[in-house]
Image (tube, rainbow, N blue to C red):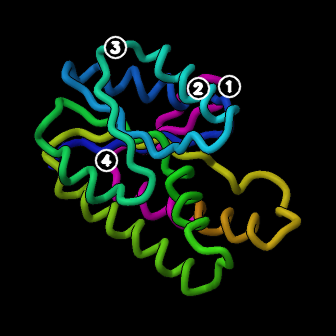
Amino acid sequence: MATTTLITGGVRSGKSRFAEQLTLSHGAPFCYLATAQALDGEMDERISRHRARRGVDWQTTEEPLALPQALARLDGSYQAILVDCITLWLTNLLLVRERPDAELEESIIGNVHCLATTLRGMATPVVLVTNEVGMGIVPEHHLGRLFRDIAGQANQILAASCNEVYALISGIPLKLK
């Protein structure tokens, strides 16, 4: 089993840059496995900025939904794979249906368990980026609360299955595991 690393923290805490540095330390070739979808101009601009910062040495694969399957398919083709980010993947899974319900929550958590199982079998080191969303106020709307609850459960499941876990605060990495 290869080393798996989970990096969590708040928005703009430096997670992606730190994850990129860790991934680069494994040597080339490396893969950026993107879960984001450019559904509007703002997201398209964010994706463009991330790509420009990474440069041409990264091979990018986009997979908004079938993340465990994409990782399994890419295993052995790279020195390291960076998944950015788990919370966008969860958002994509959550918004597949018009009306999220308890069955959808169970299905998403099932996907997270599948991802954890896939990670445990990987020969290629994987670095995962996720957001810590449970330290703020309780969201006003049901969908926001459901997302927060799913993200919190997913982060716990993935942190338990990873060899290393870091939290970034103000650009400073704190090793938790």
Whether residue 165 appears in magenta in the rendering, the answer is: yes
Q: Are marks 2 and 1 in contact (CB under 8 Å)?
A: yes
Q: Earlier in the sequence, mark 3 or mark 4?
A: 3
Q: Earlier in the sequence, mark 4 or mark 2?
A: 2
Q: Is residue 25 magenta?
A: no
Q: Quadrant of the C terminus?
A: top left
Q: Residue 56: which numbered mark, if any?
A: 3
The residues tagged by marks 1 and 4 sit, at their Cα atoms, a distance apart of: 23 Å
Determine contact: label 3, label 2, CB under 8 Å.
no
What's the CA distance linking mark 2 and mark 1?
A: 7 Å
The amino acid marked with disc number 4 is Asn
Q: Residue at x 32, y 68 (%)?
A: 114
Task: Point out the frontmost of discs 2 and 1.
Answer: 2
- Would you identify the image quadrant in which residue 82 lies? top left
Question: How many residues crowd around disc 2 within 10 Å: few (fewer than 14), some, or many (20 or more)?
Answer: some
Q: CA distance from mark 3 to mark 4?
A: 29 Å
Q: Position of residue 45 (x, y in %)?
A: 63, 26
Which range is magenta? 153-177
- Mark 1 highlights which residue? 170
Q: Which residue is mark 4?
A: 163
**Which comes sooner in the sequence, label 2 or label 1?**
2
Give the left or right position of residue 157, taking residue 137 as reference. Answer: left
Using the numbered discs, state the Cα–Cα distance from disc 4 to disc 2 in whole angstroms. 20 Å
> 27 or 61: which is nearer to us?
61
Q: Can residue 165 be spotted in the picture? A: no
Q: Amino acid at mark 2?
A: Gly
Mark 3 vs mark 2: in front: 3
